[in-house]
Image (cartoon, grey):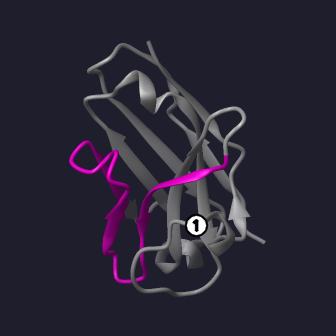
Amino acid sequence: HVQLVESGGGLVQPGGSLRLACKASLSTYATKCMAWFHQVPGKEREGVASIDSGDNTFYAKSVKGRFTIWRDTTKNTLSLQMISLKPDDTAMYYCAAYGGTCWGPRTLEKEYNQWGQGTQVTVS
């Protein structure tokens, strides 16, 4: 069972930037499917960005060109760089992992079985 711990959330003004990090407790997750989701109260979790076993990256239309997902296998860390932040980006951000290899975009909550506790991002 892997533990995922997010960090890097906070309060930022519109147009600002934040970098989120997700530390995985198992090095084997360095090559697994992983993703970032966000959730606002009263709504379902929505996939923001994902990375597959070949390090191919995929983005929701709402963040494409503003967010970048990548992993550092030496540190077992998944990161999300967010620039040009908008008030609509305000949400709890979760790191997610699937304990297997995958190819292509995976942005549905049901496609992941490991979750972090979340980190709040507020753009105001």
Residue sitting nearer the eye, 68 or 60:
60
Quarter where residue 117 is shown? top right
Outermost residue to the left: 65
Q: What residue is drawn where x is 65% and y is 80%?
A: 99
Q: Is residue 8 visible?
A: yes
Q: Which residue is drawn at 36% across and 13% down?
A: 13
Q: Is residue 73 visible?
A: no
Of residues 45 and 53, the one nearer the viewer is: 45
* Relative vertical location of residue 110 with respect to residue 9 in this rendering, above or below: below
Residue 60 image position (x, y, % from top left): 38, 55
Q: Is residue 6 above or below residue 101?
A: above
Point 32% across, 68% down: residue: 57
**Secondary structure state at the residue bearing disc 1:** loop
Find residue 103 and report its horizontal and vertical position in percent. 42, 86
Write down the residue under mark 1.
Answer: 108
Label 1 Cα crowd, 10 Å radius (few <14 / some 14-19 / many 20+)? few
Q: Where is residue 33 in the image (x, y as percent from the top left)?
A: 51, 75
Quadrant where the N terminus is found in the figure: bottom right
Report the quarter where the C terminus lies: top left
Q: What stretch is highlighted in magenta?
A: 44-70
Q: At which x and y percent is residue 15?
A: 26, 21
- Based on the displayed image, in which of its 4 quarters is residue 55 positioned? bottom left
Tell me which amino acid carries mark 1: Leu
Q: Which residue lies furthest to the front in this view?
A: 42
Horizontal side of residue 89 vs 64, given as left or right: right
Horizontal side of 15 relative to 100 (left or right) equals: left
